[in-house]
Amino acid sequence: MKSNQLRGIVAAVSGAMFLGAAPMAMADSTDDIINALIGKGVLTEEEGALLMKGRTGEKEAAEKKKAGEVKASFKDGLTFESGDKSFKAQINGRVHADYRWFDHDEGSNNAAPAGAGNSIGNVTNVADTYDIRRARLGFKANFKEYYEVEVVADLANSTTLDVGYLNIAWWKPVQFRFGQFKMPMNLEELTSSNNIDFMERSFVNGLAPAKEIGAMVHGTPFKGVTYALATSNGNAKNAETDVREDDKDVIGRVTANVAEMMDNKDMVLHAGVSYSTGDLPQGTAGVAGRTEARGATFFRAPVLGNSPTFETIDRSRVGLEGAVAYGPFKVQTEWMKMNNDFQTDARSYDLDTKNWYVQALWTITGEKYADIYKNGVFGGIKPKNDFDPKTFKGGAWEIGVRYSKFDASDYDTLGIANGTVDADVTTKAAGFSEADAYTLGVKFLPNSNMRLMLNYVKTDFEKTIGGATGGIRVNNERIDDEKALIMRAQWMF
């Protein structure tokens, strides 16, 4: 009789489990039923324990299965996450499709003859054009709480590695990164190309290191404070071009957001300082000057040939950055100086390039810049509501203005550009040593995965290197300014 009763109870309990709405709800309901039957004396303690033991095994198996499951979802990218949340991965990508239109006026500020003296010569690659500015596909994963990996392929021209690193975060204030990644210098560079304020970064970015192979220690030791200290090969990504026994670059950056320290979630009061030191092999001393619309190259840095007298060019950089944002308004500025110090057979050189910019932006639709600031960097604006093409409502609008200065006037000097040129200088400095750029921009974000951008950029060239023999020509015309209208359709996930 007792056995039949037990079988009936087991059948009833099994039926309750089968009819439950969800696995966890079924487990809890079944346990409650068994406890209630024990309390009413229908089951003995021994019989209840026997049933509970079976239920415990079932629940453990269900929890183990749930932990091993991987669920896919889409939120600003295709994301995969394990049931126990110990593994999370994301497939991401971007496509930036551009159109650029240029207008160059011949002016009295450029006396360049046909490629002689300190003229860069005739620049013929400045044309109205469509362009795939960026096309990238990447994979990013976090696992076991402490580890992060990212791999990004650059598909715009030929397939190359854009980013590839391992980040170890055993201690959040002291993390370690190894591989190819952005060096910690320049707020514009550390801001993703998906989220920069204008279509192109400023003149300042031309002086800063970008993605290089190296190692870094970084973290957030205090609320509102970040630091990073890296060492790298000191040259472009995917290669070591300096094969001498040379010193590696050392690059550091420290930032503070005073508003975050004060728990003010509507403001950003950002300040930062960065510094790098290292050396370069014999070759180009300094950086080229190209307009922020990716048009004419107006300044050519000198090139040094092989010489037994000197082996390296000592290069150092220092940068200052600041940003103030309140609600939908932001003002941001950066200044950077690059110094190249070397000695040829004839003389010593100590040459500076000093660039800076200041910009102001306003999100007309009210999105707050403080919401997209984290760990010393600004992220991407997310519209309050997605754009609805049926009602023409939603989306985010932003307008901005920027002034940017390029100053390589130190290079218009004896031995490098004019007068008796050193025998070790195989290519002289040429073009204009200074430029002023003015940018007006408007941006529309239908949703957080798309941006439509329109920028007008005017660049005035100043101070021809070498006087009457300096300057540049574009399509066989002497010019001293460039006007450009550039547009972008951008998709990212």
Image (cartoon, grey):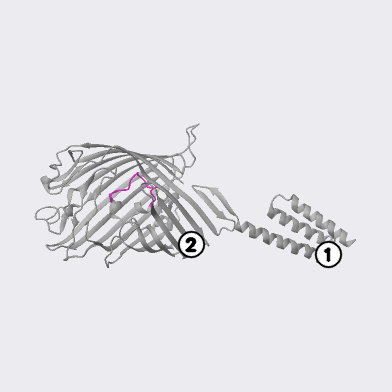
Q: Position of residue 422 (x, y in %)?
A: 12, 58
Residue 190 visible, this angle = yes
- Local SS, label 2: strand
Question: Could you tell me how many numbered marks the image carries?
Answer: 2
Give whichever of 54, 28 is nearer the camera. Answer: 54
Give the dominant element type of the magenta stretch: helix, strand or loop: loop
| Residue beneath disc 1 | 44
- The outermost residue toward the top is 390
Which residue in the protein does label 2 denote?
147
195 within the magenta span: yes
Q: Which residues are magenta?
A: 191-203
- The residue located at (83%, 62%) in the rendering is 43
Left/right placement of residue 397 relative to residue 40 reads left
Residue 416 drawn at (x, y percent): 15, 55
Which residue lies at the image location 81% right of the left edge and 55% below the top edge? 11
Q: Is residue 260 left or right of residue 202?
A: right
Compared across the picture, whether 218 is left or right of 315 comes to right
Residue 426 drawn at (x, y percent): 16, 55
Q: Please state which of residues 260 and 140 is positioned toward the viewer in this rendering.
A: 140
